[in-house]
Amino acid sequence: MVRYSALDRTFAALSDPTRRDILDRLAQGPATLGELAQPYDMTLPGLMKHVRVLEDAQLVVTEKKGRTRECRLGAEQLDDAAQWIDAYRRRWERRLDRLEGYLERQKGAPR
Amino acid sequence: MVRYSALDRTFAALSDPTRRDILDRLAQGPATLGELAQPYDMTLPGLMKHVRVLEDAQLVVTEKKGRTRECRLGAEQLDDAAQWIDAYRRRWERRLDRLEGYLERQKGAPR
C-alpha cells in the first residue's frame, strides 16, 4: 500500500551524491550518457540506473539522438522540495519563538 | 564502497511521507513514541523504524523517560539540504539567463 508522491521521488533522487553530481553537471548544459559517465569509476549500466531515478523524479529528461542518448534537466525544478523545507523551518522557528516568549515570561514572573 | 554523507541521510530521511509528518508533528513540540504512532495505522515497531532513520539523520533526538521514550527535533535543521537546493537552482537559473542572452543575440544578428 506504498504510494510514492512526487516529493518522495524528489528527495529520494537527491539522497545520492552521484545523482546530485549529475544534476550539477547538467545545470551547465546537456550531456550524453557517455559524457556523464566519464568522471566516475562506474559502468554505463550503473550510471543509467542513476539517470533513470532522476528521470522518474522528472529532474532529468533523456532523448535518443542517433547512437547516443542526450540528457538534460527536466521540468521539476525542486520548487516543491524547497517549499517543504522552508515551511518546516518556519514552523520550527515559530515554536522556538513561542518557547523563548514563555521562558521570558517565566523569568519575569514572581517566585 | 558506499559512503553516506550527512546530506544523503537528510534527503533519504525526507523521502518518506510518514517521516515528514513526524517532523511536522515534532515541530509543534516533543511527543512520546505512542503519541507519534496514534494517527497512523502502524505498529509501534514500524513507527520506531521511521524514528530511527530520523535519528540517524540527526533530525530527531529520543530520550528514555520512565516507561516511555520522548522524541523531539534534533540538531540538524535542514540548513545543508536547503543550501544545496538553493545553490543548484541558482546555477540552473544562471544557465537559463546565459541561454536567453544567447538567443537575444541570435535574434539581433544579421541573417
Image: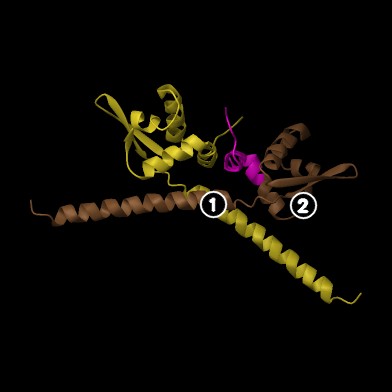
Chain colours: A brown, B yellow
Question: How far across and how far down the image is residue B85, in percent?
Answer: 57, 51
Q: Which residues are magenta?
A: A1-21
Q: Residue at x 49, y 49 (%)?
A: A85
Q: Quadrant of residue B15?
A: top right
Does residue B2 appear anywhere in the picture? Answer: yes
Q: Work out whether disc 1 and disc 2 sit on a shared chain.
A: yes
**Mark number for residue A30?**
2
Direction from residue B39 to residue A83 in the image, left or right: right
Reading the chain from its start, which is encountered first: label 1 or label 2? 2
Q: Chain of mark 2?
A: A
Residue type at tag 1: Ala
Q: Secondary structure at mark 2?
A: loop
Say which residue label 1 marks. Answer: A82
Direction from residue B93 to residue B111 in the image, left or right: right
Q: Find out whether residue A2 is within the magenta segment.
A: yes
Q: Residue at x 39, y 29 (%)?
A: B37
Q: Residue at x 45, y 35 (%)?
A: B54
Whether residue B38 is situated above or below residue A31 in the rendered picture: above
Question: How far across and how far down the image is residue B1, in percent?
Answer: 61, 29
Q: Residue at x 24, y 26 (%)?
A: B66
Mark 1–mark 2 distance (CA, rounded to whole Å): 24 Å
Residue type at tag 2: Pro
Q: Secondary structure at mark 1?
A: helix
Whether residue A88 is situated above or below residue B43 in the rendered picture: below
